[in-house]
Image (cartoon, rainbow, N blue to C red):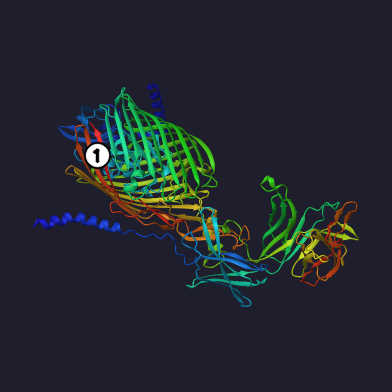
Amino acid sequence: MSRPGLSIRRALPVTCLLATLLAGACNEAFAPLQESSSKRFSIFGYLDASADTQWIRVMPIRPLRQTSPDSFGMTVTLENVATGASVELRDSLFAFTSYAGTDLGSGTQYVHDYWTTQKIEPGATYRFSARLDTGEAAEALVKIPADYAVELWLAPSSSNHFVTRDSDYLRITGLKHLPFVGQAEHFTDGCGPGVDTVWYKAKPGSDGSFEIPIARTTVPPRGEATCGTPVVKSRDLWLVGSDSVWPAGDQYSIQGLGRSELTSNVANAVGFLGGVLSKDIPYEQCALESGGQLVDSYCKLRYDQASASLRGTVTETRCGGGPIDQVTLTLTELDHDPSEVRTYVTPPEGTFYIDALVPDTRYALKARAKPVPVFGKGEIDEYSIGYDTLTFAPGEHRTYDIGLQKLIPCDQNP
Amino acid sequence: MRCAFDAVTVIARAVVLLALGLQGFTARPASAQEQAAVQGIIAQTNTGRPLEDVAVTLESGGKVAYGTFTNQNGVYRINNVQPGTYTLRSKFIGYASHVQKVTLKGGQRLTVSFRVKETPVALQGMVVHPQQGAAIKQLGRQVVTPQEIRAVPVPGGSGDLASYLQTLPGVVTTGDRGGQLYVRGGLPAGNEVLVDGIPIYEPFHILSFFSVFPEDLVSSADFYAGGFGARYHGRTSSVLDVHLREGDPNRFRTTASVSPFLASAVVEGPGGGATWLASVRHSLVQQTSPTLLGSREPMSFQSELLKMTSGHDYRCSLLAMHTADRGQIDPKVSQSYVAWNNKLVGLKCVTLRPNGQRVEANWSYSGSSSEAVTYGASKLRSSIWRVQNDTHASDVFGGIPVEGGYEVYVEVMDYDLSELFADQAKSSDGIFGASVYGEAELPIGPNLNVKPGVVLLAAPYAGVEPRLRASWTPFGAAGGTLQGALGIYRQSVVGTSDMRDVGSVFTAWMSAPDGKPLEALHAILGWQQSLGDGFNGSVEGYYKRLRNIPVPVWQSIAEFTTTLGRANGTVYGADARIELRRPHFYGFIGYGYDWTLYRAAQAAFADWFGQPVQSYHPAHDRRNQINALATFDLGGFKLSARWQFGSGLPYTQPLGFDEGFDFSKGLYDVHTDPGTTRLVLNKPFTARMPAVHRLDVSVQRAFDLSAGKLTLQAGAINAYDRHNMFYYDLFTGHRLDQLPLAPYLSVTFKSR
């Protein structure tokens, strides 16, 4: 009678052990990623009213570091909220080969950038939408700033005047935020052409305008000693205006834009989608003259919607030659005293672009190629000199090619 | 030498008396004036080493009238004895009894100190220690013996203290590799580990079963999971005070063992008036793992040790030790590795005066260096060394055992963490430390024992660390004991690691950033009870308040380089243990609950999460833990099984990968710029990994041969091949599990 009890008692540890073994066999799968219903997309980019093409990076947040060239069924649209006009952005797949991430090794990286050539209107608000075929969507409202006026106050050059003012100035009005102001200096040295950019910080004054002291800085030599001293060929000023607070500080860094609703302006996404109106203006020379004498005062160039511009190419017309290098264009105001005198020297392509021209004002244009030295004769003009008088309508952007004739036989050089 | 000890004695007495103001405590209750008391210190004849747990009785008329046990310093005390003549008898397994007639007069406190001689005895089954075991503590101190270490299955030729410690509730490892022990919410660098009085920085090997303390080298170890007394200071989490055994004083002996994981040899014997003990251990798992485990485990470690002991009245031992570890935590990441080593040498001298006063002095050098190359190819380096003299004296004043001492040291650190912590680049740093301490054991009434203590720090900063430990037996010795501890602990040298990554075991030692030491308040309260018939049980609750914990500054995306910030922490939890000792069975089961919360204030938190202060459970917050151990002696076989369970550890859950642009820095053209690939993270440590559990089993049989004893052991780690996750590499999607089923066979030979 005692045998059954004994066997049960003996079987108990074995049963427990078997139960333990079975429990142990139930190995759990591990899914480390959090399925976030509110953060499915990564969206970065901006709409620029001055750009020909708009580019926006739209990617789903993915579980693995590796990217795939496969399409993921996304429809991306932009809708002008005021007019209701909508455009669908086109998908372009980019492969960055031999990409070396800072910390993440190397490999080919596939990204989907969406684009459109639709004109973005200053002052308009656009509804951005990225929608997966599954119905999940990310949305954002992007406001583009209205056009704003830029004044470039150019101080008299110290080489020409007995009085030297401290610096030039940029003055911008009609804009809420100015996240970027930069001066791009195009130079050449022994290693070839290069660009050096100087950044300025901008804070609005009490009247809401921005006033930024700027200066024609020198370009430091490149790291390689063999490149020699850089020679600046031209300078541009680059301004980016925004109607919304622009990202600034750590919370908008690569780390900061990672997570929080506080720093992502796209619903259901991490990232940032901005709206800007950028301006690229030449940082040129200008002087004031009165009665042929230089005047010690700022030369004020105004860049806004009413400003006119002149662009074109200087070419040789008699001998069928090409563009002419080193042609100095002088544009002198005729209706004001003192007169604004601006100069521009063409590059080897012979092109020129002169902006911030005052509408309804007469300008005297003179185009003279650089004289060439001839033994025993000093310097002579190889080309004819062009003259004209021009008047511009408000907002006119005129293309005006200039033809100069060679003054010596076509097959000869000075 | 004698002069030195005299000076130490004077200093120690002054420290104790000044620090504690004991005069007020030495007055005896009026009723006790009519009673008598007997006390003394019992030590080993050859070594002078105080013996703990020696049973001391006063017998009258052939019956035991009074009794007690010696404490860790060999001190016994029997109070409230009726005046009269008694037979004082000591009993301790393996030692000869001491028998002496004593006559006590009313109000007399008689001191009887003596030495007992070791006598070889044949022991069958488990050795029973009345005050030792998994469920027994004495004022927070848990005594670990080689017998207990041996009970835990380990894939080596002998047991290991590291494996035993991991059976204790509240002791957490993040896995079976890395050698990091977290005790009750504290950090590994908060554990003070002493070997014969010498501090050792990295005592646990890269394969977490093993430490530099194998069973066959350990005489005993005192482990405090918190609430430790004034003798120990400079760490904020726990204390492991390991006493190595001495070489055999009578004959030359060798012990050698080999298993797929480890080979070791011990040589010992007398020579030149001293005893010698030399040990060499070397791992084999790197070579055997392809066959044994099915994949290569690129981990290796080794240790060498030499101990020489000499003297009688002044017993001195010289210890030199070297250890080295190197390996890849994740074998898939070929360029990464971590390596560390320890070099230490120390002289320890102990004397026991005829009046019962015990003085111990230690002079030591301990150094450690480590380096690591992490997944991101960042190379990290750290080294530290320390020269120290500490001296301790214990005595009995007016019937009150007191202990005091001093410690002076110079500690120099050098590290290069520039590729991990952007604000902690290369640096060399050195500190001078000086402190004194005193502690007394005050009997307040027959059932209450209070042990106040204090540490007075003079350098590297001035400070006071009060300590208080107490035990209360309201129903007498057989009715259970209530024990408690309270203390403040500071740590001026901190270990810094990348706590964001559980696989990062590299620790750099440096002075506490900004001169703010890591600070902890410990409060412990527990009850332990003998349940009869070999059963013991205990329950203990604890609370810790932590300040100035160095933590990596959090980022919302995963990056390898960060800065170092600070956090405060709160820890509370409870342990419950029950054990059973029988002649042929020993087992225990323990449950530990732990709740650790860090609070860190970092500027970026407000931007990223909306609140400037984030609270999170750090990566070692193992909430629930169960350990069960059973050993049987069955027909000449010894069977052991250990099962462990740990709930999942916290980790930071990612949302996924994308390419980010910092538009605060520029207007990027996304079609010409790839962006920065990043892993977008959720709030810190909001998710938990799966639970881990594992069964380890072994069977052992010893054979007596003419030349010695041969022991064969067969066993298996992770007997049911559970896939316990160690970590998951979020960048590669690679999951690294802990060891799979690992069968082993070990052979140990011990010469006669």
Q: Quadrant of residue B222?
A: top left
Quadrant housing the N terminus of chain B: top left
Helix, strand or loop at disc 1?
loop
The residue wearing badge 1 is B129
Query: Is residue B529 in sight in this rendering?
Result: yes
Give the vertical position of B470 relative to A369 (above or below): above
Q: Is residue B59 left or right of residue A103?
A: left
Using the image as rendered, state which of residue A276 and residue B434 is in the foreground.
Answer: A276
Q: Position of residue B332 (x, y in %)?
A: 42, 51
Quadrant housing the C terminus of chain B: top left
Count of number-bearing discs: 1
Query: Could you tell me which chain the residue with mark 1 belongs to?
Result: B
Q: Position of residue B36 (x, y in %)?
A: 25, 31
Q: Quadrant of residue A303?
A: bottom right
Using the image as rendered, state which of residue A393 and residue B694 is in the foreground.
Answer: A393
Identity of the residue furthest to the bottom in this view:
A84
